[in-house]
Amino acid sequence: MKKAFTMLELIFVIVIIGVLAAVIVPNTKRNPVQEAAVQIASHIRYTQHLAMTDDRYNSSDSMWHKERWQLVFSSSLYTGGADVWAYTIFSDRIGVSSGDADEDEIAKNPENSDQLMTGGYAVEDELYYGKAEFRGMKSLNIGKTYGIVGANAIDFSNSCDGSTGTSLRISFDHLGRPFQGDQKSMTGPYDAGTQRLITAECTITLTDGSETVAINIQPETGYVSLNFDP
């Protein structure tokens, strides 16, 4: 004779599943700030990878170091608003190394070569977040995607805050060592007067006003870690 579940047993199982779902589901809700931090950490590592595999050294150009790969955070009209943060990965190699990203200087999305690794940067339609022709990655606009909005939504610790205004950046040399600030004002790759090499732990703090996450970058190695309870 075949054995089967009774109706009472089936109802009991359904009730247990319902109770478990009620307990588990609230704990699996999204945390946009943590998601943003994980993404940024991954892209900082990717920037370091580009710097190490695409060494910009040029013996015939004394300013070659200005072309180092970098990740720059910015907020402007072109990112969707003066307090809406986005970031861009680029090598400042065209012309006089202005410190700003041109379309041809921006890294391409390794998963889709038609996309540029920017969340909005400049007036060109292809880089302007609000334009239909935007060629960037909307996920890199962390203001629109993850709620990283406001003058204090991103904060760099003193050890790596070599920038001013609404532009913060991290760059790397061919050994993967992290640098602070804008390379365009450096007079040499490691000149003491304009030294940008990070020598103490760099902390980038993200917040949406309620949640806060810290991204830590170690000197020399550029090792990146996350602190979800800073």
Image (cartoon, grey):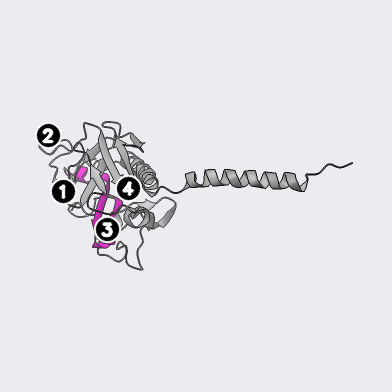
Q: Is residue 139 above or below residue 172?
A: below
In this view, which residue lies farthest toward the left?
A: 193
* Residue 210, numbered circle: 4
N-terminal of the pair, mark 3 or mark 4, is 3
**Of callouts 2 and 3, the N-terminal one:** 3
SS category of the residue bearing label 3: loop
Q: Is residue 57 left or right of residue 1?
A: left
Q: Residue at x 81, y 44 (%)?
A: 4
| Between discs 2 and 1, the one toward the N terminus | 1
Compare residues 111 and 129 and report the one nearer the observer: 129
Question: What residue lies at 24% left-to-right and 44% top-to-bottom?
Answer: 155
The reply to whether residue 137 is in sight is no
Mark 1–mark 3 distance (CA, rounded to whole Å): 17 Å
> In which quadrant will I find the N terminus?
top right
Q: Which residue is mark 3?
A: 121
Q: Which residues are magenta?
A: 63-89
Q: Tell me the mark number nearer the camera, choosing from 1 and 3.
A: 1
Q: Which residue is mark 2?
A: 192
The residue to which callout 1 is attached is: 164
Crowd tier of the residue under label 2, counting other residues whose Cα lies within 10 Å: few below 14, some 14–19, many 20 or above:
few
Q: Nearest the camera: 57 or 147?
A: 147
User: Cα distance, mark 2 to mark 3?
Assistant: 31 Å
